[in-house]
Amino acid sequence: MSFYSTQKLTLGFGASEPLLSDVTFELKSSHHLLICGATGSGKTTLMMALAGIIPKIMPNKNYAGQIALAGTPLSSLSSDALFSQIGFVAQTVEDQLWDLSVEDIIAFPLENRGVERSEIRVRVRDLMERLKLTELAGRRVLTLSGGERRMVVLAAALAPEPKILVLDEPTTGLDPAARQRLCTALAHAANTVDVVIVAEQDPIHLASITEHLAIISNGTLSQLQPLHTALNDTALWNDAGLLAPHRPARHSALQATGQELLTISKLRTKLTRASGCPVLDELDLTLCGGEVLGVIGRNGAGKTTLMRSILGLSAISSGNIALEGEAAEKWTTARRARSIAYVPQNMRQILFHMTLEEEVDFALAMGNNTESRDTILARYQLDHMGSLNPFALSARQQGQLGLACADASGAIIAIIDEPLLARDLEGRALLETFLNRMTQTGRAVMLVSHDLELVDDVSTRLAIVDDGHIPFDGTCREGWKSAAFGALNWPAPYKAVEEATS
Amino acid sequence: MTRLHDLNFFIKLAFAFGLMTVAWFAPNWQLGVSFAILCLLGLWVTKVPKLKSYMKGAGLLTLMVIASWMVNLLLQGTSVIEALTISAKMASRLVATTALFYFVMETSSPGAILAACSAARLPAIVTLVLSLTFGIIPMLRDEFERIADAQRARGMEIDNVSIVKKLRFALARGVPLLVQAIRTAHAISFSLTLYGFDLSRKRTTWRDVGLLVEPRMSWKDKTQ
């Protein structure tokens, strides 16, 4: 008998065609299901329905069909009964967080249900130790990195010991070590959790803890199939608009580099660590025209501070920053922005105009690009959307707008922080369009990411940040074999694929 | 002195109300101003975060209060000296009040307020209202600063410009701030439902709550 089932589930937002239809599957107790699909295929909507959030918390115009847990329709359960049995981690974890501390967030579901203090403390301690969150004790969650927030929300989902765990792209923003901790935690949770359903764009990271696969394509969910055999089926992934897990490694061709655009020497920040040491100390780095510099490092290594220091958002106590040979450490952030375009992970943070056209016009006002606004919008597939409010766009479309604005600004350097849009074929193509435009015109890109396969695919050079320094700076091929990378104890890109399918 | 930050929210609140009463009943401007200065010194001694920003705001408030009272009293025929003393007395009351509640707001996280309310076995609705009222203001202020950084990073020169331009750019932050406020409200309401918050059920807390509220879980002492 199935433990969890969906029957002819239909979801949509009132358009003529539903987003997803006829979603039917059954899971037995102890089954772990991986659902893959391209951006915009309906993954998040489906995951919300599977968690009961649609329609219990959020209405859905085309909702039809039934989901049952141990034979009981979810619709017949009260909110409290439902969400004490189903743990959920949203793709945008910020939707589940507010200004509480790490311990508060993890304990919140238990406190609300009146669990005794001693019991709450035992569970919170256990989860924080297991997920290696003890160093974050007392921190307010909104001050954490995206990856750290995700681990905290996962701990909160596990705290009430749910029967079902529904995770929407849980590896987003996690470094490889954190992904490993996530897998370990999910394997451990199997003692109490009966069913785990995970949505991801890249199947590799969670291949070790899921045995069934279903793919969203053409408005429906495929039949369940064994994951490990599907990993080798390149056509299956490409047809669904996804990067095939078994794609060959694709080292970016070395290009002749142009003039030095950015020179950082002996950089030391005012911002210090708990130990009193500067977050960045005596750091040297250069960036030349035509380069795509991949920057990697564990959470807290100093990557964000490096970006902020270059942008002028984080004060430095000594050292030099030069742009095209001109000393820039005294320049205001706004003046630096004429040379450096910034594309953050969360674009909402840097949008402040009422329409896409105004956003691109503002970038064009930097005066370094003579193209028309419409040409730029069309290049990033945002034509016919110019009059829309940027906040009405999906996260993916906001990422496209970020690239469009960076392109429009004509800046000589672009800093891209964790481009999540590059996780499927279409998004990857858009990112590559941007990178090509930058490098072919003698400009440069600094790409900060935990996605080692992406870094390996598109970077011409690799820098590893660790403990405020750059212990490795060279080609990717050398980088994956370097002592600095070895010290991270992460699997090299594409090695994870080999391990998952061996 | 930062241990004072961990005082139980209700003790801080009672303390602030008590001292505010003293400020408002100060018999003359000299005592009122002295008391306001003491309150400001108290903020400095207790290392309240973001004091510089508060001082800017308090300075602006003082000027506005003094100016408006002066105009009002002078129009009514009061002498300049007398108008100045009354204005100073009124301004000192407001400065003392805002300083005291700035201390409460800035040193009480929503989590610490939730814990204090839960330990006092207050109804869930009171718990929620108090933690949101005191918790959301610092959160939105931080968001306002983050958006300003984003504007700078996009090339808006918002620092070395005239006050009129500064105000215009500050207004431009309104749109993302409003969006963020709506998102925050959505996140709070979503997480309350998802995590089983029920108005008819009294909450418990993981924190040790007494005169002080435990700020974080310690791994030095493994006992519960």
Image (tube, helix red, strand yellow):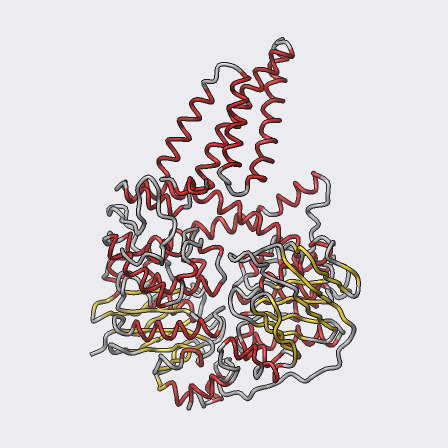
Report the residue at 77% width, 60% height from top: A327
Quarter the C terminus of chain B occupies: bottom left
Q: Position of residue A307 (x, y in %)?
A: 62, 63
Taking B73 as reference, is A281 above or below it? Answer: below
Q: Position of residue B220 (x, y in %)?
A: 35, 57
Taking A123 as reference, is B91 above or below it? Answer: above
Q: Is residue A40 left or right of residue A400?
A: left
Report the residue at 60% width, 77% height from top: A429
Q: Nearer the viewer, residue A46 or B10?
A: B10
Q: Position of residue A387 (x, y in %)?
A: 62, 58
Q: Is residue A259 left or right of residue A20?
A: right
Q: Position of residue A124 (x, y in %)?
A: 32, 60
Q: Nearer the viewer, residue B77 or A389?
A: B77
Q: Is residue B122 left or right of residue A321?
A: left
The number of numbered badges drawn on the structure is 0
Picture quarter containing residue A21?
A: bottom left
Quarter the N terminus of chain B occupies: top left
Report the residue at 37% width, 45% height from top: B112
Picture quarter containing residue A200?
A: bottom left
Q: Is residue B18 left or right of residue A264?
A: left
Residue A6 visible from this viewpoint: no
Q: Nearer the viewer, residue A76 or B102?
A: B102
Taking B61 as reference, is A307 above or below it? Answer: below
Residue A225 visible from this viewpoint: yes
